[in-house]
Amino acid sequence: MTDIDRILEIKKEMGDDLLILAHHYQSNDIIKTADFVGDSLKLAQYAQQNKKAKYIVFCGVYFMSETADILTEDRQIVLQPATIAGCPMADMADSDQAEKAWEIITRELGCDIVPITYVNSKAEIKAFCGRRGGTTVTSGNAGKVVEWGLKQNKVILFLPDQNLGRNTAYDLGVPLEHMALYDPKTECLKYSCGKKDVKIVLWNGFCHVHHKITLKHIEAARKAHPDAKIIVHPECQFEIAQAADGKGSTEYIINCVKNGEKGSKWIVGTEYNLVKRLKDTYTDKSVYILDTSSVCTNMNRTNGENLLETLLDIQKGNFEKQVTVNKDIAKDALISLETMLSLA
Ligand code: 13P
Ligand code: SF4
């Protein structure tokens, strides 16, 4: 019997006590075992709505499991099969750096700030935003949430993904010259407009998987498939997002291909597992990956073996893989997540 068959058997035995959640970037094996598959927004909403499961096994990366722990009830236990699966972008901002940035930006620009963090961030950054009247954002609701921030007539501090921040603010009419960049390593704030014209301060963070897609990939793809549409995730750099035919969350990307006409061609700039699954699922369309090296190592750390181990551990009452967020941090992080969920 394979690990996956055994997992499916245990799922039957445990019934509603067990909920397996998987992000779209997980491998096919893991997707087969999941009760719900989604982008980070849908997974957060699903985790919050489920009141039945005693054990929520999160097949994704650490910030997603933390978010599930914050949004679920205390009696519900969140576990992550690959305990070391983190997100390098989330690790690019911690709360000490954010406090320092706040001080520097306030001093330099002499303005009020509203902090908005991508959910791909540590719980302590979400808590920082909650404490300071800010919120979280996902790629699926970035437009609505940044628009909410702009309406407050304060300068937005957007962290940790500069690309999602820049792409979203630009779409909402903020010119590039009115965006500043803050580097937490050098503690330096750079901007080319007058102080009063800065609308958003972008944190110098990025997702290496998407950030390394270049215009060369776009040029090569257009040459190879001139009649295909190029769609990318908004974690891609500004020039890539502009050169593509469309951009959006994993959910947006899936819907483009799913609802595309029979025979249509799609070149997709995001994680390999998702693009491969789209190609295998929608065989009446042609799907290509924009950059073949778009692999998120951390998302791929979850496999049949460690998922099975997690379920067997639960049955033995061993919760070594449990993800828990400190109560004080969780309380403030919840404020920022709930603000987002009320806006989305
Ligand atoms: P989504 O918000 O589109 O699910 O993306 C999460 C992620 O980690 C993308 O790199
Ligand atoms: Fe983090 Fe990028 Fe992996 Fe998403 S794809 S989990 S942002 S490293």
Image: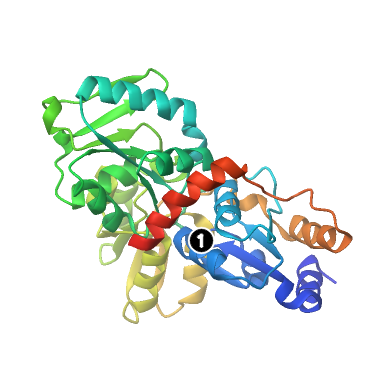
**Residue sitting at 34 percent across and 27 percent down?**
102
Q: Position of residue 165 (x, y in %)?
A: 30, 44
Front-lying residue, 104 or 58? 104
Left or right placement of residue 105 versus residue 340 in this view: left
Indicate the quadrant containing the N terminus: top left, top right, bottom left or bottom right: bottom right
Q: Amino acid at mark 1?
A: Ala
Crowding around mark 1 (Cα neighbors within 10 Å: few <14, some 14 to 19, many 20+) is many
Q: In which quarter of the view is residue 85 placed?
A: top right
Front-lying residue, 279 or 110? 110
Is label 1's Cβ within 8 Å of ligand 1? no
In terms of secondary structure, where does tag 1 sit?
helix
Left or right placement of residue 129 versus residue 71 in this view: left
Q: Position of residue 214 (x, y in %)?
A: 34, 42
The answer to whether residue 90 of the structure is visible from this angle is yes
Identify the residue under disc 1: 44
Where 143 falls versus 16 (above or below)?
Answer: above
Q: In which quarter of the view is residue 230 placed?
A: bottom left
Q: In which quarter of the view is residue 203 placed?
A: top left
Indicate the quadrant containing the C terminus: top left, top right, bottom left or bottom right: bottom left
Where 180 falls versus 9 (above or below)?
Answer: above
**Residue sitting at 74 percent across and 61 percent down?**
304
Q: Position of residue 128 (x, y in %)?
A: 44, 37
